[in-house]
Image (cartoon, helix red, strand yellow):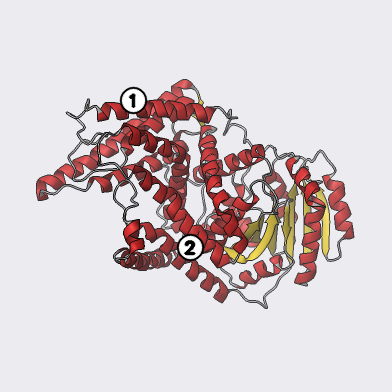
Amino acid sequence: MNPTQDSTIRKSIDYRSIDSQPEGLSVKVSTMRAPALLLTFGILSVVQLWLFQAGTFDWLFPQRDYVFAPYSGEHSIAIRTYVISFYISFSIYASGKISARIKFAADLVLRFLAICALLDLTNSAFLSLLGIPYPLTLVQIFAGLIGFALFSLMLVERGAMPEPKHVRTGEQENLRMFLRFLAIATIAGFISGFIGSLNSPVIDGMRELTLLGGIGPGVFLFLPMLFLLLYIVGVIERAISAAKDFSAPVSVIVPAFNEEHIIGETIRHIDEAARHLSEPVELLVMDNGSQDSTAKVAQDAIDAAQAVDGRVIHVATPGKAFALNRAVEEAKHELILRIDADTQINPDSIDLAIQNFHDPHIGVVGGVPLPPGGGLFDRARLVEVLLKHGYYAPALSAFWGLIGVPGMFALYRAEALHQAGPFATGMNGEDTDMSFRISELGYHAIVDQRVKYVSEVPATVAHMREQRMRWFRSVYHVTARAKNTLVNRSLSVRAKLVLPYMLLNSARRAMMVPILIFGLFQLLTDTGTDNVLVWQSIIAVLVGAPALVAFFAIIINREWIALLGMPEYFAFRALRAWYTLESVLSIRIRGSASPITQKSTIERPGTVQ
């Protein structure tokens, strides 16, 4: 297939299915809704900023933000005004009945202001006792993080979400993993603090780039240093636990819906990997109601295969999860490899992934999905996957904190799959939900950065929008379905640390474009001289740290060509932020809440059936 034909076919793919928009959980969002939200947000922001700068509220808010107590210092951004403006604007354009959205807005704003007032009350008590107030910059950073977290939690609480399904827990090494994370974080803090204290032109320049008016180079470097150390530990631990001479038979399951353009090539790559493995390989192609020639093309490719023992199974009920659950029932081997129909694996992909199962704690193994190349987003996607799957995922594995192993390529221990229960239907993120549940049983989920495969990347803007809105909704769906893990007595690092971080990060990304707009408006409305670092503050956080970590990821994975895609990657990050905003707008807001306070029980180690 020549590049021109490949590009034409990629652009003509029918990418929508029942999994794109789970019934009852999301609604279609017009491409004009996000711009309308931002216009409203801009008007609300400008009015409030102008009133603050005019001194209208100085008698109540002398800090020119919704700050209820005196503080020392200044801040670069009126973060509370920004958060409240976003809350109101989002609620106006969110999906759901008007009454439900009004309640949602009131609940968000009142809760946020109450928490801010509590922070300020604490500051007043601190001031009265010691005569020294908190630095305003520190409190504003906390207020911003609280604003992100509250938004995501309220979406889980008031948004239309999958029904909760109790997550069973088994014996885990949570305390050891928490202590490991704490030790590595301490070392990262010491190193970044030492670098931040150095006197050099580079460090001095970094001191001019602050987040919300106060974070210097030491804190700026902390997260990159933390993940670098975690990555090193994760890779070393994986290398020690894996065994090159370990192998086992495997069942490969491929759910397929209207994949006639690619399924034959996918099967040929699986057959080549089966010849490399020298172990029995069962192939189950699950035709999930395709309306094209997927079944025939797949059967022809199976008939031509040399090493796999395969068959096509028809699953009439629409939905990928139904096809996967039927395949798990049919699979006969102790290892089950899930591969998407548009994924082409390398000859050694299965072999390398299986080596990790020498460790009996391993429950699921993923790899690094490389783009095919030549598409509109492929160069940016290459940087993204090297960063997420080739760097962050192995780092999270270092303290058993990896939650999601993408279904594009996921090798499971069959026993773990059966214990965790069936793949969830009628939601986005069934693959993340499954790997999370397997991990909570006490198994270890990892990404082996040696395992490479080619996975399709949307070639059109419309396809990319559908994919990312689906992916970004999955964070909320997975959290809602597993909400008991947020409040139970387990010390799971995934449930108590990583999953809340994912929620916070999703909110931060959805609110990224508004904060850029807000920074511009504040710069234009602020007539004083104390606020000259607004843009430097924003750029340092949104570009500086991600650029540093992306560079690390490219170098470590030795994909040098990805350096050429760095400019496109930062444009793509902005596009991702836009799609995240559209994604949360697609979540239907309900009038009644489903609070994350349900009681749950923890199964004692060894009680998992």
Instruction: Select label 2 or label 1 by which is in front.
Output: 1
Residue at which label 2 appears: 605
Image coords of residue 329 (percent x, y): 72, 53
Residue at which label 1 appears: 47
Which residue is depicted at the point 22% across and 25% down? Answer: 56
Amino acid of disc 2: Pro
Image coords of residue 496 (percent x, y): 42, 53
> Which quarter of the picture shows residue 46?
top left
Amino acid of disc 1: Val
In the rendered view, would you say 214 is above or below 159? below
Image side of residue 579 versus residue 522, left or right: right
Q: Residues within 10 Å of mark 1 (few under 14, many from 20)?
A: few
In the rendered view, would you say 378 is above or below 360? above
Q: How many marks?
A: 2
Image side of residue 466 versus residue 513, left or right: right
Q: Considering depth in this image, is 387 or 410 the residue closer to the camera?
A: 387
Which residue is depicted at the point 58% across and 65% down? Answer: 557
Gap in angstroms between the C-alphas marked 2 and 1: 57 Å
Q: Is residue 161 visible?
A: no
